[in-house]
Amino acid sequence: MELREVIGRRRSIRFVRPYMPVEPEKIQMMFEAARIASHWGNVQTLRAIAIHRDTAPQEVLDNLTAMVVGWQLRIAPVVIIWYLDPDAVDDQADSLRGLVKAGALGFGPQELKEKTLEEKMIPMFASVQDFLKGPGLSEIDCGQGIAQATLMAYEQGLGTCFLGSPNSEGILRACGIPERCRMLLMQTVGYPAEHWEAGGQRPRLPFEDLFHKNEYGKPYPRSQDVIDELTEDKMFTRPAPLPDRMDELDYLQSALNLQAPGLL
Ligand SMILES: Cc1cc2nc3c(=O)[nH]c(=O)nc-3n(C[C@H](O)[C@H](O)[C@H](O)COP(=O)(O)O)c2cc1C
């Protein structure tokens, strides 16, 4: 599948097949994609634990609770706990040295680059280390890694859905993750029980309201040719709600024996 089609198929899949385990190799593929994502200073704060329902300790499973729509956690064969380790920032000097060695940072004579790095750049980063360990920049980088892993999941025919949790501390503790780490998100992973369209492309704000050129309020030009090309390449798909979606939801509720109708 081409990237554009994978992006078009990336939508929250809440209904997955509980009886079909996800191969560890496919989760590994997701983690491999996350590992090579960009990170400021190359420090790499993103971490994850994949909870496989068939082998995980009961205490871990019991702690998986969601803010909204928790039933997905009970049927998904795998739940990935994405979290961030701020202590990776402690190694930023070495990460920067690695970048200079790799030829990824700066230009000109190597000795000059190394001197500037040691005398200017590393002390500058060190002076704002506490700020860099705090919430902000690193979360953005982790988001990039999670996004790459997510596209990899869809490329392999899997479906996923993100879930926030009111029980971050409990989840970190049950998984044995050090207290200093910040929980980011849970991501359910499984083989879709619903059609890949999942009722159609979910509504989005108008392009013109989101993206601007040169000045705030001046919409970025949107060419119909580009829209047509992306439609042809299957990045843009039929908008929700599709005509048979409500019947599909009734079918899924009954097939998966989901008890409480409604949103939660
Ligand atoms: C960071 C993040 C957190 C989310 N948390 C939840 C959640 O707690 N419960 C839930 O049902 N969906 C959650 N979602 C899924 C969104 O509701 C979903 O992305 C949105 O409805 C748009 O649908 P789409 O992903 O299919 O485009 C979350 C999505 C993201 C990106």
Image (cartoon, grey):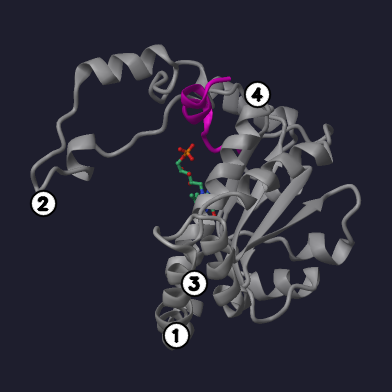
Disc 4 designates what residue?
Answer: 251
What is the spatial separation of the Cα atoms under label 3 and label 1, in whole angstroms? Answer: 13 Å
Front residue of 187 and 137: 137
Earlier-in-chain disc, 2 versus 1: 1
Of marks 4 and 3, the one in the foreground: 3
Mark 1: which secondary structure?
helix
Earlier-in-chain disc, 3 versus 1: 3
Disc 1 designates what residue?
Answer: 123
- Identity, as a three-letter code, of the amino acid under mark 1: Pro
Disc 2 designates what residue?
Answer: 216
Give percent across and percent down for residue 31: 69, 48
Earlier-in-chain disc, 3 versus 2: 3
Front residue of 33 and 74: 33
Earlier-in-chain disc, 4 versus 2: 2
- Residue interval drawn in magenta: 1-14
Locate residue 262: give its quadrant. top right
